[in-house]
Image (cartoon, rainbow, N blue to C red):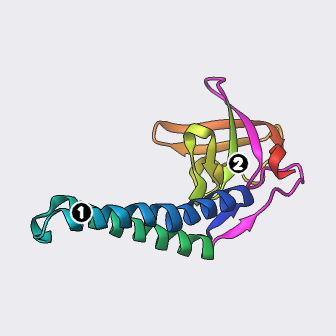
Amino acid sequence: MAELVITNEGFERLSTELERLKVEERRRVADRLRGAMASEANLAQNTEYLEAREEKLQLERRILLLKQQLGSARIVAPCLNGRVDPGERVRVREILSGHSLELQLVGQLEVDVAAGRVSVASPLGQALVGLREGQIAIVDAPRGRLGFEVLAVEVPAHAA
């Protein structure tokens, strides 16, 4: 199994989510369960109660998973060495199309493609790690082999 890495920003974001789930969401779900229990005597036929109980189970699973992930993840910081490292922003240009992308390489737990956060464990992330400006990353993608030229490597402002 590959090592689980996370940026400091991602660790803080997920820790905040964990605390919110443990405090606010547990309280909300408990209130929902109490209300459902009071509304009907036969709980086995009370769909509101059954749904609230299922929500409680899902919430507890999410809390346990976050605790385990945060407990086993290694926090990584940008290295400021001119190479692409986890936590750094990288601007790349897809060779064939000329389309430019700005990405931040992050750990597996904090991926958000819409926000430009790509996992270091993804094929693109693996190909980019360690490269310098001007070097080419080759990625085997479903639509074929793609090349990405590294245009710039930067440390995000919040990580500097």
Q: Residue at x 10, y 70 (%)?
A: 42
* Magenta-colored stretch includes residue 88: yes
Is the residue marked by circle 1 packed among few (<14), some (14-19), or many (20+) residues within 10 Å? many
| Residue 119 is at least partly visible in this image | yes
Q: Within 10 angstroms of label 2, few (less than 14), some, or many (20 or more) residues? A: many
Q: Is residue 90 magenta?
A: yes
Secondary element at tag 2? helix
Q: Amino acid at mark 2?
A: Leu
Quarter holding residue 60: bottom left
| CA distance separating discs 1 and 2 | 52 Å
Q: Which residue is mark 1?
A: 36
User: Is residue 155 shown to the viewer in this render?
Assistant: no
Across and down, in percent, residue 34 comes to: 30, 67
Image position, residue 57 (x, y; %): 34, 69
Q: Quadrant of residue 20?
A: bottom right
Q: Name the residue: 68% across, 60% down.
A: 12
Magenta span dominant secondary structure: loop
The answer to which of marks 1 and 2 sits earlier in the sequence is 1
Q: Is residue 69 above or below residue 102?
A: below
Dot 1 falls on a residue whose secondary structure is helix
Residue at which label 2 appears: 128
The amino acid at mark 1 is: Ala
User: From the viewer's perspective, is residue 76 above or below residue 142?
Assistant: below
User: Which is in the foreground here, disc 1 or disc 2?
Assistant: 1
Range of residues picked out in magenta:
72-100
Q: Position of residue 147 (x, y in %)?
A: 64, 37
Image spot of residue 78 (x, y percent) = 81, 56
Question: Residue at position x 76%, y 43% from top?
Answer: 89
Q: Nearer the viewer, residue 150 or 17?
A: 17
State the quadrant of the N terminus: bottom right
